[in-house]
């Protein structure tokens, strides 16, 4: 199929996505758009629904409600299967295969396979090609799984906590490969992680889920620009009354000082210091305040979402 018909299509769109397990809802009414070519951090507390969301995108699970589309197609279609690679948390590999056999299988299963890219990743970690998967360390297995995912040359890479068992030097190396890959081939990446510091300088897009819902989604610059960190002297026991005109995401009192992350609804005037939050501060504030009003920026909204979902918006 020609790529022309996919031009301009978002890499991923979730519409009112819901997933109910026996114990209850893991995802509810999740809607957001991830434009093609973005590197997106998927962040949320334990049990927020990140793995569930990635599993639905990778067609491992069928949603209870709503739908997800990848470049305009259902996750189960042959076309989206060809364009997407998924690196699951458990990294399912055949334990009896050698590394070389594993890559050979990747080559046989994937028409666009890039053997050199996959081999380079294995070699950079000095993993012997003749070693059986069962004899590798957890981190080495992760490296093989990453080589498989990259070797497929996907247009959309879904990564579920890909770095959790890698040492810091290797994490840095793999992030470097990820960035180079995305820059060279325009790959879209959706990556869940708990290591917030790792996302700074890597992601240009964020989706925060909590309690099964989308709390924050959009372009990083756009998200940063509509938030302000305010620091000053508290009023009585709490925040200055004048801050009440703005949307409060999170506030903390420490001694006589307060720090608040707000979405300004006009000029922020007062005897306070104001600053743009960094990515980690922004994410931590939303993670610590699950009841903060959600925000989905215009680029991350699916059709009609601003009105239909009663979600906070910012001017386009
Ligand atoms: N197979 C399952 N059966 C029943 N409940 C499940 C199943 N998988 C996940 N859940 C529940 O769904 C919710 C979301 O789980 P999920 O694994 O998607 O969260 P997560 O954000 O990836 O968490 P973590 O950061 O801990 O990996 C949790 O409450 C979890 O207990």
Image (spheres, grey):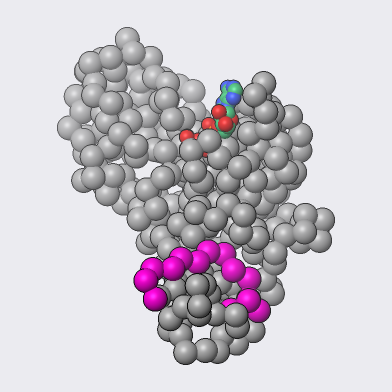
| Quarter containing the N terminus | top right
Q: Nearer the viewer, residue 144 or 64?
A: 64
Report the number of discs: 0
| Relative depth, front residue between 281 and 84 | 281
Task: Classify 246 as above or below 130.
Answer: below
Quarter-of-image position of residue 101: top left
Which residues, given as a range, are shown in magenta? 243-256
Q: Tell me: 111 left or right of 75.
A: left
Q: Nearer the viewer, residue 194 or 137?
A: 194
* 31 vs 307: above or below: above
Image coordinates of residue 267 in percent, x first then y, are 60, 87
Where residue 252 appears, x then y in whole percent?
A: 46, 66
Image location of residue 93, percent across then percent down = 39, 19
Work out whether residue 78 can be spotted: no
- At horizontal 37% and vertical 71% (from top left) the residue drawn is 255
Q: Is residue 28 part of the magenta span, yes or no?
A: no
Q: Where in the image, quadrant-wise, is ligand 1 located? A: top right
Drawn side of residue 42 relative to residue 92, left or right: right
Quarter of the image that includes the C terminus:
bottom right
Q: Is residue 134 visible?
A: yes
Which residue is rendered at x = 45% and y = 57% of the image? 284
Where is 270 relative to 68, above or below? below
Residue in the image at 58% along x and 46% along y: 210
User: Quick check: 314 left or right of 145?
Assistant: right
């Amino acid at each position: 199929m020609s790529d022309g018909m996919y031009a301009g299509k978002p890499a991923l769109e979730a519409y009112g996505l819901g997933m109910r397990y026996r114990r209850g809802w893991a995802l509810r009414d999740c809607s957001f758009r991830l434009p093609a070519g973005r590197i997106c951090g998927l962040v949320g507390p334990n049990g927020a629904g990140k793995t569930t969301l990635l599993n639905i995108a990778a067609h491992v699970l069928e949603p209870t409600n709503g739908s997800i589309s990848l470049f305009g197609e259902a996750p189960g279609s042959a076309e989206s299967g060809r364009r997407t690679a998924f690196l699951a948390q458990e990294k399912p590999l055949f334990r009896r295969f050698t590394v070389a056999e594993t890559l050979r299988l990747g080559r046989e299963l994937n028409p666009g396979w890039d053997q050199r890219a996959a081999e380079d990743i294995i070699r950079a970690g000095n993993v012997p090609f003749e070693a059986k998967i069962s004899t590798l360390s957890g981190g080495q297995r992760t490296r093989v799984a990453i080589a498989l995912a990259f070797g497929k040359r996907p247009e959309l890479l879904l990564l579920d906590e890909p770095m959790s068992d890698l040492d810091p030097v290797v994490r840095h190396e793999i992030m470097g490969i990820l960035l180079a890959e995305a820059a060279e081939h325009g790959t879209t990446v959706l990556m869940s992680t708990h290591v917030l510091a790792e996302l700074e300088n890597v992601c240009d897009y964020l989706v925060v889920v909590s309690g099964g819902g989308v709390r924050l989604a959009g372009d990083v610059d756009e998200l940063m620009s509509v938030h302000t960190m305010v620091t000053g002297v508290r009023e009585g026991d709490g925040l200055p009354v004048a801050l009440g005109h703005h949307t409060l995401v999170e506030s903390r009192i420490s001694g006589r000082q307060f720090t608040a992350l707000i979405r300004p609804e006009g000029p922020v005037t007062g005897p306070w210091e104001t600053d743009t939050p960094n990515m980690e501060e922004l994410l931590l504030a939303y993670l610590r305040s699950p009841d903060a009003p959600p925000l989905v920026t215009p680029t991350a909204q699916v059709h009609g979402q601003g009105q239909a979902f009663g979600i906070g918006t910012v001017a386009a």
